[in-house]
Amino acid sequence: MNKFEQLGLSESLLRAILDLGFENPTEVQEKAIPLLLAQDTDMVALAQTGTGKTAAFGFPLIQKIDADNRNTQALILSPTRELCLQITNEIKNYSKYEKGINVVAIYGGASITEQAREIKRGAQIIVATPGRMQDMINRGLVNISQINYCILDEADEMLNMGFYEDIVNILSTSPDEKSTWLFSATMPQEVARIAKQFMSEPLEITVGTKNSGSATVSHEFYLVNARDRYEALKRLADANPDIFSVVFCRTKRDTQAVAEKLIEDGYSAAALHGDLSQAQRDGVMKSFRGRQIQMLVATDVAARGIDVDNITHVVNYQLPDEVETYNHRSGRTGRAGKLGTSIVIVTKSELRKISAIERIIKQKFEEKSIPSGIEICEIQLLHLANKIKDTEVDHEIDNYLPAINNVLEDLSKEELIKKMVSVEFNRFINYYKKNRDISAQSAGERRESDGAPRDNSGAVRYFVNIGSRDNFDWMSLKDFLKETLDLGRDDVFKVDVKEGFSFFNTDAEHSAKVMDILNGIELEGRKINVEISKNDGGGRSSSRRDHNGRSGGFGGGRSGGGGGFRSDRSSAPKREGGFRSDRGGSSDRPVRRSEGFSSDRPRREGGFSERAPRRSEGTRSEAPRARRPRRD
């Protein structure tokens, strides 16, 4: 007996469930469906991404809709276009045997007049992104004043993306007596505020522990030096030949750079970020779903709403600004009861974030070492052997076998195997023989302070006349300096932001570049002035006044991860499936390397990357852009 039959669902829904191959309800479905069917109530459901939340609200919603009434009866809000379309398709599949139910998707990037036309024809259920929905309400193209149900799916993600005002305005347009169902992976203050303002004594169900991580995802971190971050990413990919992953970076620029370098090194990779057009984004996602891409390098915003089955790994190339965001990243793997792995590549200065994440997800990270070259070679050799064993023979090769046998007739079986494997293996092992171990010293007791101290020998401390009144915090100023000076993330450190001025450090080799570039630009019509400070940023010093008479102490700020060296060696042949191939894609334009890159390695046959202009992705505050004066 199908367990869905015990939840009180109608016969038509059970037929659709049977067609979809669902056998047992997930925990959130088992808890939510009977409650939502039994009464009209508000509900807050906390469950990780990938636990079947769409069916948890979709089945009872369809059963409660009046198919004979063509007016809009339900609104489902979701954070992204992809998730909006996914929910729409799933609701249509669930309601395939319900005659007369019409579901319409409303999202940006498509014709608003065509969407309005579809609603006018009659749409009992609207699935929408908040921005487009608010736009249509403002234009009078949609009426939700009589809806009976409003569902907020991935509520925490919508609020993280800045949709708070849109959601409040939309909910304010809807009737007070409707039922509101809020589904979220975590319960931050903004979500709690929405629940308090627009819900009346909501029922609450929790799958797992509130704000906790999924039990099907294991968490690992690899401690490396900042300059070895990209090399660590490649080794982890090589150590997992069947990897199918999302690789997260903090900014659009880093996302594009890492993806381009992976492609140049022969991996099947592509970038996904906000500078891509919708057509480019659709092309990337189509290739990723079709497994033409093994490593999708993405920003947090661009990856919101991605629902792709069987992702084996989530790789945190850089940790997010907000530790709560880690939960959303790791939720991309380990779905539908399958096991997944969330990997963090971390530097010593970021170890404090590991402890903070552990407290939120209520799970421990396992510290692991980056695999050595010999370990990777062994993994790849066995992978190749299994690949050969499992390869289906195309009998079109039979015509060529006599000539091939003639060439190989003097070789024994053992010699033939050795030579066949060595064709791919020799150059691979030669690469790793000359590469050092890149694992940093074990974390040991993790520091809860603001990162491990950095060796300041040879560092230069600068004073600059911009600060918090210019809408900078330490993170946004660091990103601004990194982009303006074209430096790696760890090339700018100890950033200390005051009201009217700030301090930061670079290595001495960048001093001339810093002085030349920063003293030649303007910010909001005001000329930037930078001077070399006598303090190294290691502690407190006597205060100095800025150009407006304000005073503030010298002091060391926080430093992030990333950055490093670039290698001019890129002559290694490309490879396929962990070993070299004579074919392979390479980037058709120069790579601007903002992370530590090294490319003298065997390359894998790679996919493609949709090119887009590089702009730094927004951080916590939107800092103004500097303008370089014209030079005649």
Image (spheres, helix red, strand yellow):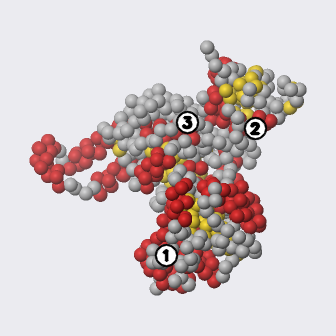
Please tell me whether residue 216 is drawn above or below residue 434 in the rendered image: below
Q: Which of the pair 530/598 is nearer the observer? A: 530
The picture places residue 334, in percent across and down from the top left corner, at 52, 62
Contact (Cβ within 8 Å) of mark 2 with mark 3: no
SS at mark 2 in the image: loop
- Tag 1: amino acid: Gly
Residue 581 can be seen in this image: yes
- Tag 2: amino acid: Asn
Tell me if mark 2 has few (under 14), some (14-19) or many (20+) residues whose alpha carbon lies within 10 angstroms of its own.
Answer: some
The disc placed on residue 100 is: 1
Residue beneath disc 2 = 471
Residue at point 18%, 47% (across, down): 412
- Tag 3: amino acid: Arg
Please tell me whether residue 120 is drawn above or below residue 630 in the rendered image: below
The disc placed on residue 253 is: none
Q: Residue furthest top?
A: 632
Tell me if mark 1 has few (under 14), some (14-19) or many (20+) residues whose alpha carbon lies within 10 angstroms of its own.
Answer: some
Q: Earlier in the sequence, mark 1 or mark 3?
A: 1
SS at mark 1 in the image: loop
Which quadrant of the figure has residue 19?
bottom left
The picture places residue 402, in percent across and down from the top left corner, at 10, 47
Which quadrant of the figure has residue 250?
top right
Residue beneath disc 3 = 614
Q: Earlier in the sequence, mark 2 or mark 3?
A: 2
Residue 567 left/right relative to 546: left
Cα distance in 3D space between marks 2 and 3? 22 Å
Residue 450 left/right relative to 431: right
Residue at point 69%, 73% (across, down): 178
Contact (Cβ within 8 Å) of mark 1 with mark 3: no
Residue 311 left/right relative to 364: left
The picture places residue 615, in percent across and down from the top left corner, at 59, 36
Cα distance in 3D space between marks 1 and 2? 53 Å
